[in-house]
DNA sequence: TATTTAAGTGTAATATTTACATTTAATTAA
DNA sequence: TTAATTAAATGTAAATATTACACTTAAATA
């Protein structure tokens, strides 16, 4: 190595994932029972350590895949958490990522192997370290995201009803929305394709299914 | 230490600051001539390494003060940059922060000592590592911020004219704005106090000075 | 007294958001 | 077969926010 820096402290680099899913009426987060000390047995976010040859983004993807079996998942960096005492074992700076996944698609055996469970965002237990703080910041970020671009592609099944989409928005925003205004607004974004099929499980009349128009949806990405 | 983790790679933790300032018509960024190898003599963001007893936020404040002499500065974490080869000397993860300062208030001797210079955001030279990328993300963040909350308190002198505030918005957003609509909009936010004083430097008629109402301004903070 | 300079001001048109209630299609029960 | 039930589907008016656009005013200077 040609040059070297003066001596500076090195720290462990961790990644923690806030994994959002949506099921019927509720926005949920996937938590695991920590299986090593300290705080063994407590609930926590799924995390891991950065490897020498990967970026933080890649580490987050890897960790997510290990837990859910899914790849090509929507992932966004939230921020880095760095309190000197946040991890009692060693100085560790953790970068939090949030992910959006379709609950039905994750590999249940993998999550079971990691003793993972879905929790409604209203019922998050006390977590280790600063993980509750990470979650509340992730929810804020998701709320902001939902208010500036269409959301749901990653969280809903391929085909879904207007009602389901509205319930998702209500769960994220934490408030009820007017049905007619919601439909008007979402249709004006021009990202949905109305199908000929109906979902018959929710009512006698049945309700039309929609899917996202991937190209038009992606135009909203920055 | 009661527990220890398996062996994981440790990395250097750096902080880099994108320091925004505004002068007359232009949004500017403060850059320094790097005074150590590698890339000595090239332009770069002001940065430094995390110390054992501080958070990243605190490190960013410290670095900012070292360069400008200012404290209690507006600072916000942008994101962490982690490409394995981003720093050729050693594995270094850098967390970028952006700061908003009043150009007139910084200590010119300090910036001179660090061979620092202000550059218009249109004229940023090629910087070391991924610093150009950091800057472009910081500008995007600042644009978003300007479109969702009042901005300017940190970037303008205490007293300023409507015209100066409009020029600031135009510099941040990169587009011209209609004078009447701008005034209408900014007054509707109810964060300004109109003073009896006039600024006589810009025209024969003079233009009224305003200042921010700190309390009302802060209500927009999240 | 006329000219110059930038400041200061208003209105109409359009687009967006909000509030709000009835009808429809299909199934199930009588 | 008819009535009752259930959630889906639909429209409009009012309020608010945004955009486009041009003339008048105050003061200094020539």
Image (cartoon, coloured by chain):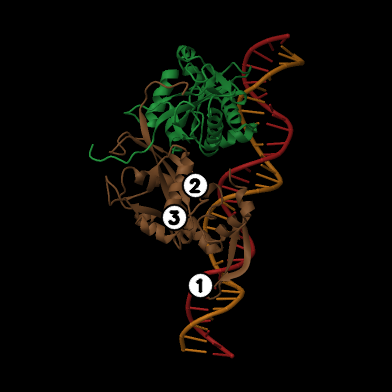
Chain colours: A brown, B green, C orange, D red
* Left or right side of B118 for A31: left
- Callout 2: 10 Å neighbours few (<14), some, many (20+)? some
Q: Mark 2 lies on which chain?
A: A
**First-in-chain label (1 vs 2):** 2
**Tag on residue A68?**
3
Tell me the CA gap for discs 3 and 1.
28 Å
- The answer to whether any part of residue A15 appears in the image is yes
**SS under mark 1:** loop
Between disc 2 and disc 3, the foreground one is 3
**First-in-chain label (2 vs 3):** 3
- Identified at 38% across, 36% down, the residue is B9
**SS under mark 3:** helix
- Identified at 55% across, 72% down, the residue is A206
Q: Mark 3 lies on which chain?
A: A
Give the camera-side residue of C2 and A193.
Answer: A193
Do the residues at pointers 1 and 2 share their chain? yes
Do the residues at pointers 2 and 3 share their chain? yes
Tell me the CA gap for discs 1 and 2.
32 Å
**Tag on residue A75?**
2
């Amino acid at each position: 190595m040609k040059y070297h820096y003066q001596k500076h402290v090195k720290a462990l680099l961790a990644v923690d994932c806030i994994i959002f899913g949506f099921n019927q009426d509720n926005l949920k987060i996937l938590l695991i029972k920590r299986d090593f000390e300290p705080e063994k047995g407590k609930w926590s976010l799924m995390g891991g350590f950065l490897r020498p040859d990967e970026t933080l983004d890649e580490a987050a993807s890897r960790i997510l895949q290990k837990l859910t079996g899914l790849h090509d998942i929507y992932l966004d960096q939230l921020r880095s958490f760095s309190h000197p005492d946040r991890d009692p074992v060693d100085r560790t700076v953790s970068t939090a990522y949030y992910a959006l996944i379709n609950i039905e698609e994750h590999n249940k055996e993998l999550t079971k192997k990691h003793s993972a469970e879905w929790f409604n965002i209203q019922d998050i237990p006390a977590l280790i370290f600063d993980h509750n703080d990470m979650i509340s910041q992730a929810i804020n970020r998701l709320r902001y995201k939902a208010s500036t671009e269409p959301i749901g592609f990653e969280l809903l099944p391929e085909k879904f009803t207007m009602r389901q989409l509205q319930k998702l928005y209500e769960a994220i925003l934490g408030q009820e929305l007017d049905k007619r205004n919601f439909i008007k607004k979402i249709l004006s974004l021009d990202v949905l394709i109305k199908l000929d099929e109906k979902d018959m499980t929710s009512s006698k009349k049945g309700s039309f299914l929609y899917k996202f128009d991937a190209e038009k949806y992606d135009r909203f990405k920055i």
